Image: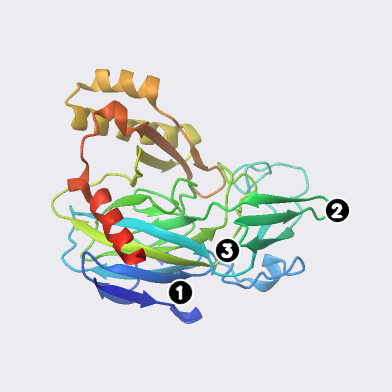
Amino acid sequence: MNVVSYRPAPEELSYTFGGRAPVGKVRPGTIMELYTEDCFGGLVRSVDDLPSRVCEFPYLNPVTGPFHVEGAEPGDTLALHFVSITPARDWAVSTTFPHFGALTGTHTTAMLQPPLEERVWRYDIDLGRGVAVYHARNSDFSVALPLDPMHGTVGVAPAANEARMTITPDAHGGNMDTPELRAGVTVYLGVNVEGGLFSIGDGHGRQGHGEVCGTAVESAMNTVVAVELIKGMATPWPRLEDDLHLMSTGSARPLEDAYRISQHDLVTWAAELTGLDTLDAYQLVSQAGQAPVGNVCDTNYTMVAKMPKEYLGRAAVYESAHERLRALGSAYTR
């Protein structure tokens, strides 16, 4: 088993997908032990550390990477299986921002009311109990929320030599912010440039669907990922697979276009897997599918279309990469 560990120094963090040389090369079949910083680069540590004071735009939402996968070429697909995602500190933070979030005026939704207050909440992370403890700022109210660690940002370099800020989700991946991207899940990313150049970051101790206020329980993470390459198989939009479901994503504005992209990809994928014609697959997904929201706060919004495998005849996808990588991850943890 080939295991690679990488912990970036602050100056090695990346803030774009594309436009940057790889920090390392890995072979397909590699297990990677990665440290990722939170979306504030670890600079927001207390309720008094307002991001506008301690962070510098555009140096937000750092990712670890990019990594060049040997043999990856445009038209291939990278499969990244998340073996484990573990908060790296005993605290995490969340915030509200002026002009950012789903329930406030923004620069694109210009409103006359005053900007939303900038406020920080600090969560206590208790790995032993498996909880993130919420503390209200203006009362003594407190509640322990179950940890459900996930990564908000994962992606590859975009096509056409483009560089995209890590906060923007699109066909290359990016800041999709879907709670579905937890341990035990394999994400499939279409390769656009030689090596793929994938990066991971933006760990969340937990997040509600939609990331309504604009931030989750933002946490540094120790993450283990198994890497595979599927040759000659393209992936139009990021797709996810867990033991029971297949999922398609779509990222765009307005939200209904993100929804349409994700549903279109799932319907056409289901037709391909089952041999159904498009309208038969459309009918099946319409009655058996789910539509979890990723984010409704970023520069593009993200929707997920989710379908139980049992309704698709349990057809193998991507050469059974999820099963192989899950087995590799199990061997690593033994």
Q: Left or right: 224 with respect to 150?
A: left
**Residue 322 placement (x, y as % from top left):** 27, 49
Q: Amino acid at mark 2?
A: Asp
Q: Secondary structure at mark 1?
A: loop
Callout 2 touching callout 3 (CB < 8 Å): no
Q: Secondary structure at mark 2?
A: loop
Q: Amino acid at mark 1?
A: Leu
User: Residue 29, which numbered label?
Assistant: none
Residue under label 3: 219
Residue under label 1: 13
Colour mapping = rainbow
Determine whether 291 is above or below 240 in the image.
Answer: above
Instruction: Between residue 322 and residue 38, name the one nearer to us.
Output: 322
Residue under label 2: 140
**Residue 163 placement (x, y as % from top left):** 37, 62
Disc 1/disc 3 C-alpha distance (Å): 15 Å
Instruction: Between residue 170 and residue 225, name the one nearer to us.
Output: 225
Q: Residue at x 35, y 63 (%)?
A: 225
User: Which of label 1 and label 3 is nearer to you?
Assistant: 3
Q: Earlier in the sequence, mark 2 or mark 3?
A: 2
- The C terminus - image quarter: bottom left
Residue 110's image quarter? top right
